[in-house]
Image: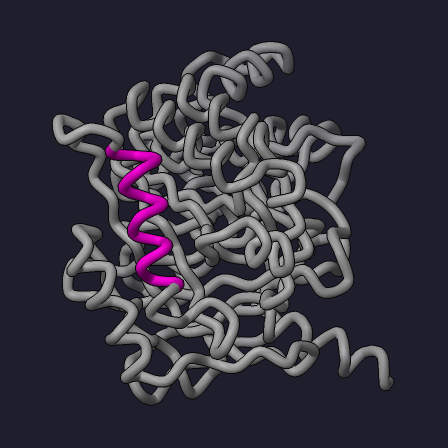
Amino acid sequence: MNTQKVDLLSLLPDELEEFLISLGEPKYRAKQLFTQMHRGVSPVDMTNIGKITKQKLDEVAFYSLPRIKRKLVSAIDGTVKYLFELSDGNSVESVVMKYKHGNTICVSSQVGCRMGCAFCASTIGGKLRDLAPSEILGQVLVAQNDTGERISNIVMMGIGEPLDNYQNVIKFLRLVGCEDGMNIGYRHISVSTCGLVDKIDMLAKEDMPITLSISLHASDDETRSSIMPVNRRWNIAALLDACRRYYQSTGRRISFEYTLISGKNDSVASAERLAKLLNKALRPSKSDSFPIHVNLIPVNPVAETEFSATGKQAVQRFAKTLEDNGIRATVRRTLGADINASCGQLRREEEKKNAYN
């Protein structure tokens, strides 16, 4: 990524307008550029701007999209997994999933991750750097152009902790929602977090009606701390307090993600404890209407960990126990099983291959 020049794709419409005016360009040029760039067209290839304008931009600015390094397509359900190479040679992953209601893309927000969740491939090797707004947006643009189908929904559950790259993620959300750009509304976007309480409180003030997804994965602090180091900073009680504040401020429902790990957090007792925990923290009185939804996810086996997925019967028992205790629960549909579609694994394979070469 060129840090000496202005990153055009990371500029909001008013910022782009101000930048172009500073170069002596007319105000209307901003919309011309913005619209085309957000379709994946580089300024150098645009036919509606002149040679002199292109020269000016080339001297002080840059436009860059990630390059498809590897692409895997599921023969089972058409899920597409991308390994994208960034301009500095680093790689991130995205996954396009096809549903009846439209296409959803799972995007990365960082190169690597420093959160250290024990079951996650993305965190092996730590965090190398944050992604710029343009690098997050670029994943959506390139995937949409490659598939030839509109992407209508975004989940920020790929490599990295989105709220650990707070300002860039917020700017990406504003960019992707621009009417002259991809025009994907906030209500079609989910942002996942492992539980950065201070950033959840900040997000509540952004006036962005997204869906917040909380990676919970345990019903007690001892278990959660053993698999998610962030719990040592903000324990479950502090996290759920933040969730309650978020809901009171935004009125937006929160989804709780719960990865089921065989023998670790998947017992009926764990389900009962989880239901009691959520009801007590989020619905302390009968008049409380906090909409609790738990999304159950059998863990994806990662070579560097010893964790294995919970069996189907145990998953159903866990879900039924939650439902019996007043907690809505769904089991995430497995997509792209034949291409290891969970984020982090393709990048990890590439790193291993490069290490041996």
Residue at x-position 60% and y-position 74%: 345
Residue at x-position 48% and y-position 70%: 342
Q: Is residue 244 magenta?
A: no
Q: Is residue 271 magenta?
A: yes
On screen, 195 above or below 320? Answer: above
Q: Main secondary structure of the magenta part?
A: helix
Residue at x-position 64% and y-position 81%: 306
Q: Is residue 352 left or right of residue 104?
A: right
Residue at x-position 69% and y-position 35%: 58
Q: Quadrant of residue 186?
A: top left
Residue 280 % position (x, y): 31, 38
Looking at the rendered structure, the number of numbered marks drawn on it comes to 0
In magenta, the rendered stretch is 270-283
Is residue 238 among the parts visible in the rendering?
yes
Quadrant housing the N terminus: top right
Residue 40 % position (x, y): 46, 49
